[in-house]
Amino acid sequence: MTGDRPPPDKRQVTVPVTAPAPSLAKSATLPVAAGQEDSAPEDMGEPRRTDPKSFIVGAVASLGQVALPLAFGAYAVLDGEPARLLFAIPALLAILVVSTALAYLGWYRFTYRIGASDIRVESGVIARAARSVPYERIQDVSLEQKLLPRLFGLVEVRFETGAGGKDELKLAYLTEAEGERLREVVRSQKDGAAPVPGADTPAEPVEAPPPLFAMGPRRVVTFGLFEFSLAVVAVVAGAAQQFDFLLPFDLWDFDAWQDRLAGPGRWLAGLGIAAQIAGGIIAAATFVAIGFLTGLVRTALREWDFRLERTDKGLRRRRGLLTRTDVVMPIHRVQALRIGTGAVRRWFGWRELKLVSLAQDSGSANHSVAPFAQAGEIAPIVAVTGFHLPGEGLGWHRATSQYRTDQVVLAGVILFPLALGLAIAGQGMIAAVPLLGFAVIAAMEFANWRFVAAGLDADQLFLRRNFLAPKIAIASRVKLQSAEISQGPIARRRGYATLSLGLAGGKFAISGISLERARQLRAAVLESIAGRDFSELV
């Protein structure tokens, strides 16, 4: 009788919960009886493990993670007595053996299945968990190769589901061919293509199309020269603060620094004012050189061999020296464009083009598809996405003069009392700093009043901002989701408002325009939204 059956062994399985939109997809954990985890639906393929070499990669990576703690542990155990090393070695070997064994069990117990409607992953050494992700919930599939997996010809496959970016599905690691095949399988299933290829079916070779945009070594080096960075200085300062116990004196004891530099300081002072100025110039030049070198190295590591190609699935971007990333961005998911430049690079004609996609929750909404390009190189990419650049006859509407004036007045309300307080305290030279800041703010507000503007044509909305480092945002009118007019106490009295437009994957706000103009833009945008069936955009 059924009442005599033993109670089922409860285990954990993660199943998807239907959400009204892909960006709201969540998963829930429900108990499943023992034996059901092996009775997969008919459309499920055979369970597969990741590449065996991934265990080696994981073991080596784990050694890198425990190397520093082990070094500190050995230092504490030895305490200046090398004889204690004989007692420390067995403990260290035991830790390495246990961590390696756990890594192997984790790899062995991790399996995935490629079905006709979803991907299922089962993991866990003691407590088993299964997760099923339907293809329609997968927003993007990307391939990533860090240095160590790349040496073994392996890739990490990431499935972006829009579930907040904290619980994305990933398979680490697969061969490059299997990663490419799996990505094509997922995209084909999302498009309602033929049945899933077999596990051993190789991906058909496709001739690489000519790139829409590419950066060779010379372009990357030029790009790096504009990416001045002092990150290495911050890292060294942070490391010195964390490991200050290794120094023979307190890092933040300025008297100790003065004592240590007293000798060299007296020697430098004896050379005269010219030598002191030369020493200061050399120190400043060294500081600047470190900044340029750091920016160059960071840029080369990130952008090396940058290639952007047009495929039947969208725009494919590959880049990276040590960590190689391979991302395909579906064109129909592009919500807006951002074109920007810097305060210095603008004079050389260099710009950056970013795509704003639906993958905001996964933390990769802004995909840089042309990080360092000229205007003539950006235009073809913009055309491929279905957008267009602003035309010559586009009418631009600036913020009101009242809005810019109020911004300057508010800055003065804060900075003038600060300058007065410093002057009363006898800090005459320092008191000039707030006044100089006020002058800079006033000049920037005047420049932005002349430059920052919004425009509207039959298909798109344009926003031009930031005079010092110009940027322009381009949004499709039919892909905007809402329009809201807001006014603060001052804005209500002065007759201007902020128009905030809802955009999946980004923000689009027009500040300081007249209330009448804000209402006109809102009416035009809402008319475009209401006149389009959004199911046609999916």
Image (cartoon, rainbow, N blue to C red):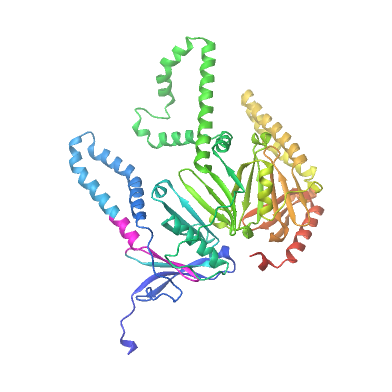
- Residue 377 in the image: x percent, y percent? 66, 44
Q: Residue furthest bottom?
A: 1
The answer to whether residue 136 shows anywhere in this view is: no
Residue 207 position in % (x across, y down): 54, 54
Residue positioned 45% across, 15% down in the render: 265
Q: Position of residue 462 (x, y in %)?
A: 73, 50
Marks counted in the figure total 0
39 w.r.t. 334: above or below: below
State the quadrant of the C terminus: bottom right
Give the residues drawn in magenta, as a range. Answer: 101-125
Q: Is residue 440 visible?
A: yes
Of residue 81 and residue 195, the one placed in the foreground of this image is 195
Q: Quadrant of residue 47?
A: bottom left
Is 83 on the left or on the right of 179, as rendered?
left
Residue at image position (42%, 48%) is: 150
Instruction: Judge left or right: residue 122 versus residue 349.
Output: left
Q: Residue at x 79, y 43 (%)?
A: 402
Please state which of residues 420 and 200 is positioned toward the viewer in this rendering: 200
Q: Quadrant of residue 475?
A: bottom right
37 left or right, relative to 406: left
Q: Nearer the viewer, residue 13 or 440?
A: 13
Q: Is residue 36 magenta?
A: no
